[in-house]
Amino acid sequence: MKTLHIIPKEVLSIGLFILGLAMLTPTLSLAANAAEQRGLDIASEADQRDFGFGDYRVHLEMTLRNKHQQQTSRSMRNTTREQADDGEKTLIIFDNPRDVKGTAFLSHTHKAGADDQWLFLPALKRVKRISSSNKAGPFMGSEFAYEDISSQEVEKYTYNFRGEESFDARNHFVVERFPTNAKSGYHKQVVWYDQAEYRIWKIDFYDRRDELFKTLTYSDYNQYLNKYWRANQMDMINHKTGKSTTLTFSAYQFAIGTTDMDFTASRLKRAR
């Protein structure tokens, strides 16, 4: 005579739950992969639309505000050169006020590996290399980090498509991107691209504890060479300190004829 085994309800419920998870896992995995690929596709499309400008020079005004809205301003020149098989090279020279005049910042952004960055401080008369561990620090006392100043190469992140959102009479793609650099100051960034031109209008930065840290907004876009869009203003707000920094761009010049020799650390002391 066979013995009849009765399965307790609790065990049966757990078993059915595990079975349900096993059946659901492939579906969740496919959805995650699709969201990752969609996010990557959007970032790649935005990057491709901005490729081919060659080089440019632009004047910048940096306005720094403390939590009481007291402000100071700095004037700079930014020269950027595009690389066919790597990131961009950027040279920023401070023209005033007097205490920062002659300060020069050089960045070589790479698609793979750590970026190379140097800072020339005229008071010390020496070139300082920015270490990877310091790139999360503030750039010249602003709310922009050194890693924010580098070009944001697609290969520097993994992605997740979050959906679509409309604001300011525009439809946007919303994409999360996660830095691959373990020394980044951010856990993730949430980026809003408009669906018409794939321009970035807003980025929320989350710190290593995944808490909202800063928000960067772009405004007043102009198109150059009938293709390349540039925002005339960027506003970075630090939600933890109440401080903010505004970058205002003007007098863009494209095809200025730079060479790689214009972006070497050895020439920083002579940058004018």
Image: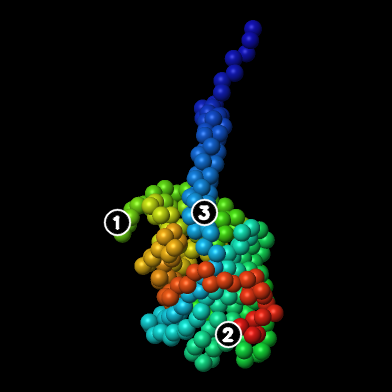
The single residue placed furthest to the left in the displayed view is: 169
Q: Quadrant of the N terminus?
A: top right
Above or below 140: residue 154: above
x and y percentages locating residue 216 in the rendered image: 44, 67
**Spatial CA span between label 3 and label 1:** 25 Å
Which mark, residue 272? 2
Q: Residues within 10 Å of mark 2 (few under 14, many from 20)?
A: some
Q: What element does badge 1 sit on? A: loop
Residue type at mark 1 is Ala
The single residue placed furthest to the top in the displayed view is: 1
| Residue under pointer 3 | 48
Lower sequence index among marks 3 and 1: 3
Above or below 99: residue 12: above
Which residue is drawn at the image coordinates 50% and 81% (left, top)? 76
x and y percentages locating residue 61 in the rendered image: 44, 80
x and y percentages locating residue 244 in the rendered image: 43, 76
Lower sequence index among marks 1 and 2: 1
Left/right placement of residue 86 relative to residue 17 reads: right
Residue type at mark 2 is Arg
Which residue is drawn at the image coordinates 51% and 92% (left, top)? 98
